[in-house]
Image (cartoon, rainbow, N blue to C red):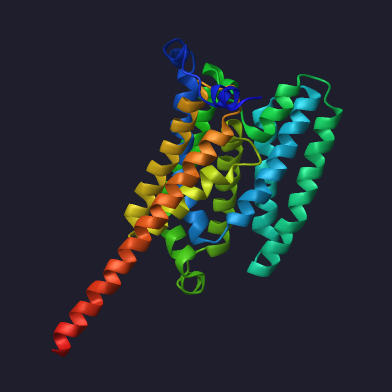
Amino acid sequence: MSLQDILHAIFNFDNYGELLPLFRDSIIAGAVLGLVGGLIGTFVMMRDLAFAVHGIAELSFAGAALALLVGANVVAGSLVGSVAAAVLIGIMGVRARDKNSTIGVIMPFGLGLGILFLSLYQGRAANKFGLLTGQIVAVDSTALNVLVGTAAVVVIGLLAIWRPLTFASADPDIAQARGVPVRGLSLTFMVLLGVAVALSIQIVGALLVLALVITPAAAALKVTATPVKVVVLSVVFAMVATVGGIMLALGGSIPISPYVTTLSFMIYLVSRGIGAVRRRRGWGGRQATAALRAG
């Protein structure tokens, strides 16, 4: 395959105007997932649960693969797998070391089950591939309604526990001493995280869900330390990566996930560069102020 053929497969906008209205539901779904991923990702980073997201995604993949094998609803299977993994991690992983060990056990088990179920599945190969890498055509009006409704539950749940969860995430020992139900909040958040991961898998696939839940929040933290700005930037970055990835994928013949992950990574690199420049300027400013005071 020549370089021109490769570029044509990645970027092809010949009939872009005709394709755009056909994927309206997918674009809306991407924006909704960007909102959910950006919001919940800030708490994932605050609570150091990036590894947990990967573990939840593996069992979500296994649940979706089992549903595909038996002819059940794939989204429902993905949700069951995600929530089951989230609850297991929330209950078994009390301390950081226990949590990492639990996730390390769950990940290969979920991935192995998923591969087993896909190997037994005799249907279209595109359905198998879509579970791992996402697929833009998976969202129709019915699926969009379910996604929006479920996403609303996650957002409302997060808003309901936002203040105590922030306190418990920043300093769990002091929060518990002041009567905050730290363990209950942790378990509730893990369930919400499981649902968010299951929703994200529909677009970016099980293998690359970190690009939607982790990278935008990590990029926001490189730019600012102000809590409100971190949340806003995380949501904006996630929506740009998801919707932008979908828009680019319309003209190509490859799965959507490379577009989303590449955009997300580019946002992270730019944010990291901006953060480095701001830190250098801040250090230079402090040096200059110290010199003036000394003089």
Image quarter hosting the C terminus: bottom left
Residue 84 in view here = yes
Q: Is residue 205 left or right of residue 170?
A: right
User: Relative to residue 155, is residue 2 depicted above or below?
Assistant: above
* Identity of the residue drawn at 37% across and 54% down: 230
- Compare residues 74 and 14 and report the one nearer the observer: 14
* Identity of the residue drawn at 24% across and 79% down: 287
Q: Is residue 93 left or right of residue 14?
A: right
- Residue 277 figure quarter: bottom left
* Identity of the residue drawn at 54% across and 52% down: 189
- Compare residues 269 and 222 and report the one nearer the observer: 269
> In the rendering, at what x and y percent does residue 169 appear?
48, 63
Image quarter hosting the N terminus: top right
User: Relative to residue 281, is residue 52 depicted above or below?
Assistant: above
> In the rendering, at what x and y percent does residue 78 appear?
67, 35
Q: Is residue 98 left or right of residue 223?
A: right
> In the rendering, at what x and y percent does residue 81 appear?
70, 40
Residue furthest out toward the front = 2
User: Relative to residue 66, is residue 216 depicted above or below?
Assistant: below
* Identity of the residue drawn at 50% across and 20% down: 12
Labels in figure, total: 0
